[in-house]
Image (cartoon, rainbow, N blue to C red):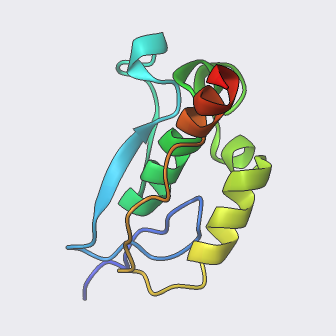
Amino acid sequence: MTDPAPICPLCLRPIPAGVKQSQHHLIPKLKGGKGGPTILIHQICHNEIHATLTETELAREYNTPEALRAHPRLAAFFDWVGKRPPDFHARSTGSLRKQRSRKRKR
């Protein structure tokens, strides 16, 4: 009997063996989270987290799966990707942080 695939705590899809996945440090390593708690998530979910939030925001406000799921942009993304097959992966649409930076420079 094989063990069931772990479930991504963000998009709630299974993470079968061989699917792009990664360990997300709930507190970024650069902000003191080295050796701290991690969660196994889909790589696409991980990409979206880091495209949306800064390391400081992650450390201060979004350091639990529940907090990440409550963020408005991430909640919409996790809802959308949650309707895709477990092995679905696409490139990130781009960093929200970069978009904010471009607006400030104008």
Residue visible at 73% across and 64% down in the picture? 76
Which residue is most to the left? 18
From the image, which quarter does the N terminus lie in? bottom left
Residue visible at 57% across and 59% down in the picture? 9
Residue visible at 49% across and 69% down in the picture? 7
Total number of numbered discs in the rendering: 0
Residue visible at 69% across and 72% down in the picture? 79
Could you say which is closer to the camera, residue 17 or residue 85? 85
Let me know if residue 32 appears in the view: no
Residue 64: x %, y % from top left: 64, 38
* Vertical side of 26 occupied by 81: above or below: below
Let me know if residue 35 appears in the view: yes
From the image, which quarter does the C terminus lie in? top right
Query: Quarter of the image holding residue 86?
Result: bottom left
On screen, residue 75 versus residue 24, left or right, reads: right
* Vertical side of 67 occupied by 37: above or below: above
Residue 15: x %, y % from top left: 38, 72
* Vertical side of 77 occupied by 39: above or below: above
Residue 84: x %, y % from top left: 52, 85
Which residue is most to the front? 106
* Vertical side of 78 occupied by 100: above or below: above
Query: Quarter of the image holding residue 61?
Result: top right
Residue 60: x %, y % from top left: 68, 19
Could you say which is closer to the camera, residue 21 or residue 52? 52
